[in-house]
Image (cartoon, grey):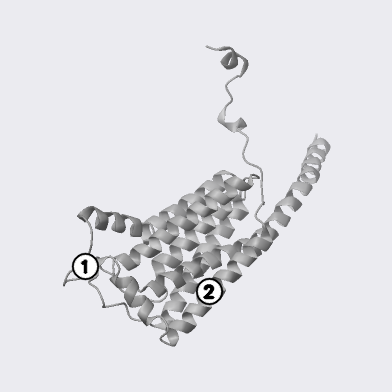
């Protein structure tokens, strides 16, 4: 046993220091990011409604396809990788990660953050479903589909919900770090992963490029706007609880003293 081990006693699990409430998300930056995303989403909706994306969508779907059957180029491993990436935006995996994030936040005693994260994901899913119903765009038939897909095409549900879940998750946990480099790395990784999920839908032939771009912008915008609008009230409530905690402890101590 080295000298450091002898000097540092083993601590039981109950004494492990939990992360403090960081709340270091820049509300102004989150609002700007959300506004830019939803502005881009609105522009794409207008272009789709007016036929302005047809040439772009066709080129995007045909890229990487070859031969008379318009098969996806490359070895079979490429198709397997694309399917694995798209699974990250599927119902099972993204909800599994979302539930895991809620459990982790509850374990860290960040109950409000867990509730806000769950609210962000659920309301975002409802918004995407409503948008699909309102637009009613059919799925592309330009290239063969490499997997089964049903429902309306615009906006892409995988793209919207992957961006929503992973970016909202990144924002929730990045807020616990006071190091800007850590926050940007976590959020940037979530944006990259969700963007890969979005483009995989085009490679599989089940969505137009405009579907996935709009879906990603919508999901990311919802996550950023929710972080900007909801986490400040959570911070105020948490700080209020922390200020009131000594008062409650003193009241309990006084009550016990009077009983004895």
Q: Percent position (x, y) of residue 50?
A: 44, 88
State the SS at label 1.
strand
Residue 40 badge: 2
Residue at left offset 36%, top offset 61%: 90
Residue at left offset 53%, top offset 59%: 118
Quadrant where the image shows the C terminus? top right
Which one is in front in this view, the residue at disc 1 or the one at disc 2? 1
Q: Percent position (x, y) of residue 191?
A: 49, 58
Q: Does residue 230 appear anywhere in the picture?
A: no
Q: Does residue 186 appear anywhere in the picture?
A: yes
Which sits in the foreground, 30 or 227?
30
Query: Which residue lies under the disc numbered 1?
Result: 66
Residue at left offset 17%, top offset 71%: 69
Q: For this view, does 121 lie left or right of residue 133?
A: right
Residue at left offset 37%, top offset 82%: 54
Q: Which quarter of the figure has residue 39?
A: bottom right
Q: For this view, does 142 lie left or right of residue 51?
A: left
Identify the residue at the far bottom of this view. Answer: 50
């Amino acid at each position: 046993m080295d000298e450091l081990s002898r000097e540092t006693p083993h601590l039981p699990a109950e004494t492990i220091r939990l992360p403090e409430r960081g709340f270091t998300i820049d509300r102004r930056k989150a609002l700007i990011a959300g506004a830019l995303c939803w502005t881009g989403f609105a522009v794409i909706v207008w272009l789709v409604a007016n036929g302005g994306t047809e040439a772009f969508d066709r080129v995007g779907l045909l890229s990487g396809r070859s031969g008379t059957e318009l098969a996806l180029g490359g070895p079979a491993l490429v198709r397997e990788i694309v399917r694995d990436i798209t699974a990250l935006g599927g119902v099972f995996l993204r909800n599994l990660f979302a539930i895991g994030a809620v459990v982790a936040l509850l374990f860290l005693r960040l109950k409000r953050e867990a509730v806000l994260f769950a609210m962000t994901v659920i309301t975002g899913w409802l918004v995407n479903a409503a948008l699909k119903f309102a637009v009613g765009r059919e799925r592309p038939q330009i290239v063969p589909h490499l997997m089964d897909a049903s429902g309306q095409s615009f906006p892409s549900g995988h793209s919207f919900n992957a961006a929503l879940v992973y970016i909202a998750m990144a924002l929730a946990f990045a807020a616990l770090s006071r190091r800007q480099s850590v926050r940007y790395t976590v959020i940037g990784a979530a944006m990259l992963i969700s963007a890969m999920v979005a483009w995989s839908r085009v490679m599989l032939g089940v969505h137009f490029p405009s579907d996935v771009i709009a879906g990603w912008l919508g999901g990311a915008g919802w996550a950023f706007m929710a972080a900007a609008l909801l986490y400040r009230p959570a911070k105020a409530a948490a700080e209020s609880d922390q200020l009131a905690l000594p008062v409650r402890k003193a009241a309990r101590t006084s009550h016990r003293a009077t009983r004895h």
